[in-house]
Every structure is written in structure tokens, then in C-alpha cells.
Amino acid sequence: MELTKTALGIELGSTRIKAVLIDERHLPVASGDYEWENQLVDGIWTYSMEAVHTGLQTCFANLKADVKEKYGVELTTVGAIGVSAMMHGYLPFDKEGRQLAEFRTWRNTITGEAAAKLTELFGFNIPQRWSIAHLYQAMLNGEEHVKDIAYLTTLAGYIHWKLTGEKLMGVGEASGMFPIDSAKLDYDGDMLCKFKDLTGLDLRRILPRVAVAGESGGRLTADGAKFLDPAGTLQPGIPVAPCEGDAGTGMAATNSVRVRTGNVSAGTSDFAMIVTDKPLGVHREIDMVTTPAGLPVAMVHCNNCTSDINAWVRLFAEFAEAIGAPQDRGQLFTLLFNKALEGDADCGGLLNYNYFSGEGVTDLDEGRPVFARTPDAAFTLANFMRAQLLSALATLKIGLDILTETEAVRIDKLYGHGGFFKTPGVGQRMLSAAVGAPVSVMETAGEGGPYGMALLAGYMLWKEADETLEDYLDKKVFANASSSTLLADERDIAGFKSFLARYCRAFPVERAAAAHI
């Protein structure tokens, strides 16, 4: 292996930190990962910085071990590195680099007052999870630390800063902190002025500098190399791409960065990203972000997707162990996902709400997982699993209907990626039933965000002069990519509509659960 002819992508996702190393053919050649989970501490969804550091370093150590085992070489360098993470959230630091408040993740729904006031002020939807909503809510709350903020960033921005010393981020990640002007590829100037008039704070003083895909994000410093690889074998000086969010890396991983293409990323959360060619109205359910190259993107983001499924699979695994027939967790997921295909199209009357946390699309500040059925419902394992899968997509469908029906947004191609699509054909078929359109899944779909970040690092390293990201992905990465396209049949589509109608009609049950349990 020629290490300088590789590109490394690392993504800190909600339940897993993963590193993917690709070669010049843009194919994954090695990987490493680390499983973790967020914590609810004093009402705040968070990860400790100790967990961030340990997880990142363990993930990289596992990548090094994989390279050593497969190729017999020590991973001392790569051609380029890129880091991504779950978007949004709140990470403030003082001028000495000290963290001023706990990391507040995208999952929190504690900024309703700030988000509503900023949306009205800007005439632009500001979701609760955006960094600017967290900052303004901290101001409204009178939190003492606000006056000492010298740098406000995201998790990806923090890791990039630790690796390079540079306070910058990719435009897609920045678009989840503060609205972006896609013509200028920078924060919206008018909105910055409005915020300063409102609060007296000049955000340019504390926000990261904005970069676009293909630009340099700096180089790995000696301290950064030691931070990533405490064993000390990784050498400094490696070019580092601008960090990105998991939305941008998902677009790159599925070649969904061109106008009228879209993708659905489905894991702990799920979100649909549609690259638009026209301005949209202001909708609370729709975020406007950008591609890594800065094109405007309409985003339907749902806080809850597979957490409820994962919890039930853990329960089934515990049962299997109790009866002396332990199951491999991956095989159990495959078995149960495939079982869902045997269920009634409308889940036989079963109902499920997968809300582990609050949900912006349906205006809930807290969530409670709820499974319900009527006495005469067809309560089978197949219908139960199908209800779990359709529930994971129901809120996304509510948001997508605003895009496709109210705003008449055209979607030429829709790709799926993330853990929900790992079992071939199942999640893909359920999503197709939800949107009533073909859904494609690439063979690299399971690699997801870290693969997309590796591609963005590779683009910075290997692109030709004036070559756009759209052309680079089309012609050099995905020209011969293997993918499968599936269109759900009319029975599946009608079944999803029936399930969703029941889901929406009974939604007061979920509201009552959040209020009283």
C-alpha cells in the first residue's frame, strides 16, 4: 500500500465513530470504529469530551490495526484527512481554549423560544438544534458563560481545531450553525447584522471561518497527530480537508450534490436532503442548509429513527440468550428486517411511535416510545417489525410531503444510505413505499458518512483545476458504481399511506405519553 495515495475520512456519529480509508480508485481499503452512546445529564443530551477523545483515539487505533493486519504496514501517514460529525449543537470556548458549557447535541429540544424568535427576525427557519438557537437561548436564559465565549463551534469543528489549530469548517457544516448565503459562500451578512442589532454580539468574532469543498483546511500539526494517535506513529504535515457535517458527507457518499438529486440518511436520526434550484417558503419543518460546495439544500431532519428498533432487537437478543440460543446481533437485525417483508402492508392495525427524544417536525419537546394496538389487530412478529420500520420513516414522510406537494420540489434521483439500509432490499423498499418513488442504494451505502468524508478529502487531494465537486463525483467516483434501484409495489405504497393516516390520527396518544409518563 502506498499510504500517500490514500484519503482518510472519520465521522463521529450518534452511536458509532468510524474511520474509512480509501485508495485512489475511491474504494474502501481499511476501517476502524468505536461504539458509544449519548447521555441525558441534567436534562441535556450530551457526550463528555473525555468520551469524544477516547472514542476518536480508539477508532483510529482500530484503523491502524486493520491496515497492519491487511497490508503488513504501519499507518504512519495518509494523503489527506477529513473529519465529520453529527451536525449542529453547541460547543463554546473561552479565549484560553477552555470549554465553557457541556456539549449540547442536535438531539436537544430546549431552545424553542430562541428558535421561534430568530425565525421571525430572519424570515428564515431556525431549527432548535442549530448552534445559533442554542447560543441565543443561553443568552435568554442569562447563562453566565456567554460573556466569555471567544469561539463557538460544533463537534466536527472542535476536532478539526484540535488536529490543525484552524478555526474553520466546511460550508455544509457551517450552514447548520448559522444561515448561509449560497451566492457568497459565507454566513448571511444581513442576518449577522440583525443578530448584532438584537444582542450586541458580532458573531463573526466567534464563529468558524467558512470554507468550501476542495479548499485546504490546514495541515495536521504535531499536537494534532499526538491527539489522534497517542502511540506517536502518525506523522504531522498531512493535508486536512475542511470538516463537514453528517448531512454533507451523506450527500457526497451517495452522489447527491447536484441540483434535483436527493438522499435519505437513516440511522439514529434520519433526514432527507434535496438539492434545490429555487427559493422555498419558510416552513418550520424544513431546514435550508447547503451541499459541501455551497448549493442550497432543503432538509427534513427527524431526531428519531432507529433507536427504538435497536432497543427491541436488544430485547430479542436477550430472549435468545435466555433460552440458550444466543444470536449474532448483525444476523438478528437481518432476520427481523426480512421478517417485516412478510407483514401486512399496513402492519395489521399495529401502531408505533419511535420517539426517544423530542421531535421538531411534529412539535414535541420530549418523546416517549409507544407501541399500541387494538384487541383485534393482527399481532404477529412480521407486523410488529413492519410497524417498527414504518414508524422510523413516518415523521420523515410528513416533512417530505411539504417539499413535494406544497413547494412542488422536483426530485430526479433519491438515494438511501445508513444503517437502516444495511439489510438488502428491506429499508429500501419501505422508503420507496413512503415516498412513492424509486430508491437507489449503492454498494457502499453501509459505509455512509465516513466514506463521504474520505471522498471529500480525496477531492481536495486529487481534483483537477476548476473541477467541480459534482463532476468529480460523477466522473471519477461513481461512474461505474454498483447500485440497486427498487420501486415499492402499489400494495406497499397504499399500506404505508394507511399506516401514516392511523399514525397521524392517533398522535394525541404520543403527546399524552410525553405529558404524563
Image (spheres, rainbow, N blue to C red):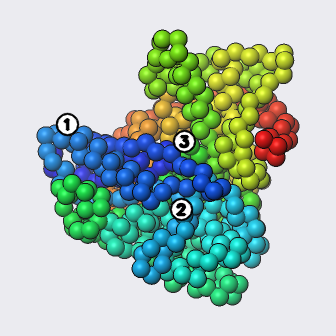
Q: Is residue 373 above or below residue 354?
A: above
Q: Label 2 belongs to which residue? A: 103
Q: Are marks 1 and 3 in contact (CB under 8 Å)?
A: no
User: As shown in the figure, which amino acid type bears the numbered disc 3?
Assistant: Gly
Residue 176, given in percent of the width and then of the height, sits at 57, 64
Task: Point out the tag, 2 or 1, that comes first from the N-terminus.
Answer: 1
Q: Label 1 belongs to which residue? A: 70
Q: For marks 1 and 3, give the CA distance.
A: 29 Å
Q: Which quarter shows the N terminus?
A: top left
Q: For marks 3 and 2, give the CA distance.
A: 21 Å
Decide: few, some or many residues near mark 1? Use Cα within 10 Å; few <14, some 14-19, many ≥20.
Answer: few
Residue 267's tag is: 3
Nearer to us in this view, 327 or 254: 327
Q: For marks 2 and 1, give the CA distance.
A: 37 Å
User: As shown in the figure, which amino acid type bears the numbered disc 2?
Assistant: Phe
Task: Point out the tag, 1 or 3, that comes first from the N-terminus.
Answer: 1
Q: Is residue 409 left or right of residue 476?
A: right
